[in-house]
């Protein structure tokens, strides 16, 4: 299964509005408002049901406890095998003058919730399928022919309770036959809250210290939250809560990539199969509408099915623990999705947040205000992770919990810098540290193949972007740029390229230390830097809807020029047009030993070193200024 076609052609031909309003019909799990056929036609349905196999909860909980010590996703359900279809199960009831109804109930003793898993799911035109619990307090549907997946495999959200009912209406004149084959029943034994009132907690099982995303702490993160998803993943016969990020790519064509953790797809020494991935369920916008904890479950939207593109980290023990999938369908505009930006630089983040669904609960936010620290995970021998500690805020002390795996770590600019592997934090241990696989390491460091890296998918044209802003489908501008090089010698020139998303119509560039120092063209060329040092670049992109600013501090590095090099004795180091001589100059031989030399000439922009008397060979000169250092090679020849 390939990724769905990008939106790029719609932008090129001016069909954006038509597409955004029509895409919902392509969803893998849309449902349409409707009334249960039994209520619509006043039917009395049989009361018998089919009982699924029993679950040994003692063994399951013991297995969870034993696996809880290592890196493992938060298992919440197991799949009971079933073999049911309309031809051999349930009852068909005729409705005079209308059609007929197929009905059956499946139960599993002790389940908190149940969800169906199909290997065949094909509803004819005109047919309506409803799935609900008893009493009918949770109804899914109507599923129609628009719900049919491109692949035969399908799954739905769970319904609470220990029984699940299927009701299908087939109107007279339907040409095709309902084709359903139910092969598995998700038996939820935890991670699903069945109570109706939560005045003192969130809608679920997460800890009391957690902070809802729409508290004041989330005010500055209202865009980013729309790209964070809850995932119900399947690996074999087990189901898990994890988190994912709807992520932007350099083409900015809205390909629906979702980034999560490698260990969310790994259990019992096996990875999720391609057919397992077809039944992963992705939840959008599952959150409290405000800072308070809701008394009833908030609404949400879902999509079903994905294909694997790349993963790395051998479940986190030897790498950075990432797993990239592509949803089988484009995300509809009605979901108001935000495609999250990222920063692939190996630079600590001074502050930021994590947005996540702890224990599968509604969306929470955890805050840090101390710099992340480069770290290993499980003594894997490589600096593949960021270590972060959480900060108490006015509405709580957000941490992470089981079920938060795969959630994004954002830096101060709202860009993803990591994905959660695990850690020690909890509401009972708010000082515990957590570890996030570095986006930097995800990029190319987990292996040499396209299936080991993010780069081939998120930068397929090899533009070389170090950072990429997030974006909506709308014409919201997100500023982004790159330079053809970021390191030049004194008097060197740099060309800049605008990569802003949306539809920018004006640009204002500011080049610290550059000549010219500002520009209003889209892609400035030939910006010359006349003095050594590091310099900021700022771009303000905008249109009549909005503007956005991107400031990259110390983005450009200008290095001194050494001439002649090689030389028999003297080397002149040119620093630029103004007085720029360094505070300290040192010389080292090839063994790293400091050696003596003479400074024979000091001018406002030039320093002359004399190496007469030293053996021919390669030397390193180190220059230090207040906010700049430079190390260069000197080739001394006989």
Image (cartoon, rainbow, N blue to C red):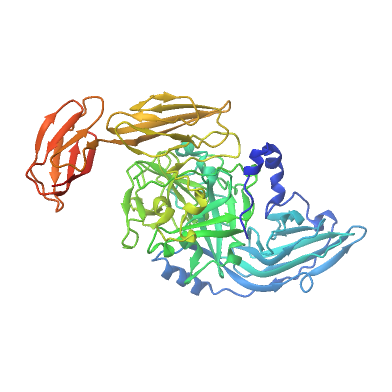
What residue occupies the far front of the structure in this picture?
638
Nearest to the observer: residue 77 or residue 193: 77
Residue 625 is at least partly visible in this image:
no
Nearest to the observer: residue 273 or residue 238: 273
Residue 192 image position (x, y, % from top left): 56, 58
Quarter occupied by the N terminus: bottom right
Who's the residue at 12% across and 40% down the image? 569
Tell whether 182 sits left or right of 516. Answer: right
Residue 465 image position (x, y, % from top left): 45, 43
Measured along the vertical axis of the image, is residue 102 above or below residue 345?
below
Measured along the vertical axis of the image, is residue 319 above or below residue 291?
below
Residue 165 image position (x, y, % from top left): 72, 63
Tell whether 233 sits left or right of 30. Answer: left
Nearest to the observer: residue 503 or residue 595: 595
What residue occupies the far right of the structure in this picture?
97
Residue 408 image position (x, y, % from top left): 46, 49
Residue 503 is at least partly visible in this image:
yes
Who's the residue at 9% across and 40% down the image? 597
């Amino acid at each position: 299964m390939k990724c769905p076609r990008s939106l790029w052609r719609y932008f090129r031909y001016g069909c954006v509005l038509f597409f955004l309003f029509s895409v919902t019909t392509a969803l893998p799990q849309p449902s349409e408002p409707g009334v249960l056929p039994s209520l619509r036609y006043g039917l009395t349905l049989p009361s018998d049901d089919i009982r699924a196999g029993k679950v040994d909860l003692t063994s399951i909980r013991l297995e969870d406890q034993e696996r809880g010590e290592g890196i493992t996703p938060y298992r919440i359900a197991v799949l009971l095998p079933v073999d049911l279809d309309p031809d051999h199960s349930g009852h068909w009831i005729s409705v005079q003058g209308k059609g007929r109804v197929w009905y059956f109930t499946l139960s599993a003793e002790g389940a908190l919730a149940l969800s169906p898993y199909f290997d065949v799911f094909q509803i004819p035109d005109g047919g309506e399928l409803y799935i609900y619990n008893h009493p009918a307090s949770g109804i899914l549907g109507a599923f129609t022919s628009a719900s049919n997946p491109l692949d035969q495999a399908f799954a739905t959200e769970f319904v609470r309770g220990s029984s699940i009912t299927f009701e299908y209406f087939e109107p007279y004149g339907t040409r095709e036959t309902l084709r359903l084959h139910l092969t598995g029943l998700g038996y939820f034994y935890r991670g699903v809250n069945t109570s109706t009132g939560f005045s003192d907690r969130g809608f679920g099982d997460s800890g009391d210290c957690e902070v809802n995303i729409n508290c004041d702490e989330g005010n500055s993160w209202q865009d980013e939250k729309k790209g964070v998803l809850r995932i119900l993943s399947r690996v074999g016969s087990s189901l898990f809560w994890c988190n994912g990020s709807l992520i932007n790519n350099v083409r900015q064509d809205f390909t629906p990539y979702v980034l999560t953790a490698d260990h969310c797809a790994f259990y019992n020494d096996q990875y999720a199969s391609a057919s397992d991935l077809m039944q992963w369920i992705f939840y959008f916008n599952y959150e409290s509408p405000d800072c308070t904890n809701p008394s009833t479950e908030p609404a949400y939207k879902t999509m079903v099915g994905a294909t694997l593109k790349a993963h790395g980290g051998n479940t986190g023990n030897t790498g950075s623990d990432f797993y990239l999938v592509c949803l089988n369908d484009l995300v509809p505009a009605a979901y108001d999705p935000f495609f999250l930006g990222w920063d692939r630089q190996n630079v600590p983040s001074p502050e930021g947040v994590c947005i996540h669904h702890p224990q599968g609960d509604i969306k929470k936010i955890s805050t840090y205000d101390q710099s992340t620290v480069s770290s290993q995970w499980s003594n894997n021998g490589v600096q593949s992770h960021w270590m972060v500690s959480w900060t108490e805020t006015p509405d709580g002390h957000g941490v992470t919990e089981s079920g938060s795996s795969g959630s994004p770590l954002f830096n101060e600019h709202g860009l993803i810098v990591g994905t959660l592997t695990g850690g020690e934090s909890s509401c009972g241990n708010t000082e515990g540290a957590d570890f996030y696989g570095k986006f930097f390491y995800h990029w190319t460091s987990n292996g040499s193949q396209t299936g080991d890296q993010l780069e081939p998918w998120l930068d397929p044209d090899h533009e070389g972007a170090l950072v990429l802003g997030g974006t909506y489908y709308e014409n919201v501008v997100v500023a982004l740029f790159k330079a053809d090089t970021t390191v030049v010698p004194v008097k060197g020139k740099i060309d800049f390229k605008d990569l802003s998303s949306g539809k920018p119509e004006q640009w204002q560039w500011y080049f610290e230390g550059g000549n010219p120092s500002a520009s209003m063209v889209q892609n400035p060329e030939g910006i010359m830097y006349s003095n050594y040092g590091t310099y900021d670049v700022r771009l303000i992109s905008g249109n009549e809807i909005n503007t956005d600013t991107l400031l990259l501090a110390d983005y450009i590095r200008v290095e001194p020029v050494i001439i002649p090099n090689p030389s028999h004795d003297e080397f002149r180091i040119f620093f630029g047009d103004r007085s720029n001589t360094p505070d300290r100059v040192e010389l080292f031989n090839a063994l790293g030993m400091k050696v003596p030399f003479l400074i024979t000439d000091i001018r406002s922009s030039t320093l002359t070193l004399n190496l007469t008397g030293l053996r021919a060979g390669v030397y390193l000169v180190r220059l230090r200024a207040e906010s700049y250092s430079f190390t260069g090679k000197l080739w001394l020849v006989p």
